Amino acid sequence: SSLVVQGGTRELSFSDIQDRIYPMAAQYGASSDKEVTVFTFEVHQDFLDEFYPIIKGLILTPRFAEEDFSRTLVNQQNYVDQVIRASSDEDYSKMALEDLLFRGTNYQHMKQGTSEGVANITLAQVKDHYQKLFTRNNLTIGIAGNYSDSFLQQLRQDMSQLPDGNPVLPEPGKARMPNGIEVEIVAKAGAFGSVIFTGFPL
């Protein structure tokens, strides 16, 4: 999802897209969690017709260029190796709690990946993941604002061009229920403060 929004389309490079959307004050991004990826696109209604080909291109024909992949991978590796550990004690604590709550299940891993995992991702794996998971049978569209019925129909029609597959999704793991109150302390030299998080596996 990061490569989709931080890359280009078949017709436009990432820098081309940024140049085009700047006068529109448009923006877009992606948020991935363990069960869902959400792509969000925002634009003023006056620029919808100009912005829509970019939306369509990013979702249907992402460029998946090697240079975009390399840049995105370096950013992800830096976030996992440096940012979480070095400059975001609060996020680090939240992830430690999540690790404890779901330890031993397929929900334990950070959604940002592990250091070794990120380092071993290949562009071929990214393309394969897109083909298998980003399908028209695995899509929900949410839309709000001042748009026409014809635009919504066009959006639905275009998104039906996504691959026609039914992805095999892993079964969710069963959380281990704590035996009374369990505490895990993460000690970090030079931390700016102390943070306490509590959680209940459901």
Image (cartoon, rainbow, N blue to C red):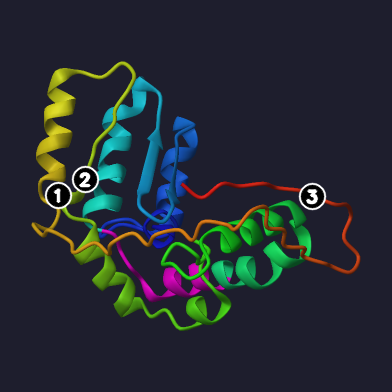
Sort mark 1 into few (<14), some (14-19) or many (20+) by Cα contacts within 10 Å.
some
Amino acid type at image mark 3:
Val
Residue at 39% in and 76% down: 66
State yes or no: discs 2 and 1 in contact (Cβ < 8 Å). yes
Chief SS of the magenta region: helix
Residue type at the position of mark 2: Leu
Disc 3 crowd, CA 10 A, few/some/many (<14, 14-19, 20+): few
- The circle on residue 139 is 2
Q: In front: 9, or 60?
A: 60
Left or right relative to 120: residue 139: left
Q: Which contiguous range is marked in magenta?
A: 62-74
Q: Secondary structure at mark 3?
A: loop
> Which label number is shown at residue 148?
none
- For the residues labelled 3 and 2, say whether their Cβ atoms are less than 8 Å apart: no
Q: Secondary structure at mark 2?
A: loop
Which residue type carries mark 1?
Answer: Arg
Question: Marks 3 and 1: which is nearer the front?
Answer: 3
Which residue is under mark 1? 136
Q: Looking at the image, is mark 3 or mark 1 earlier in the sequence?
A: 1
Q: Which residue is mark 3?
A: 195
Q: Is residue 48 above or below residue 114?
A: above
Relative to 12, is 122 above or below?
below
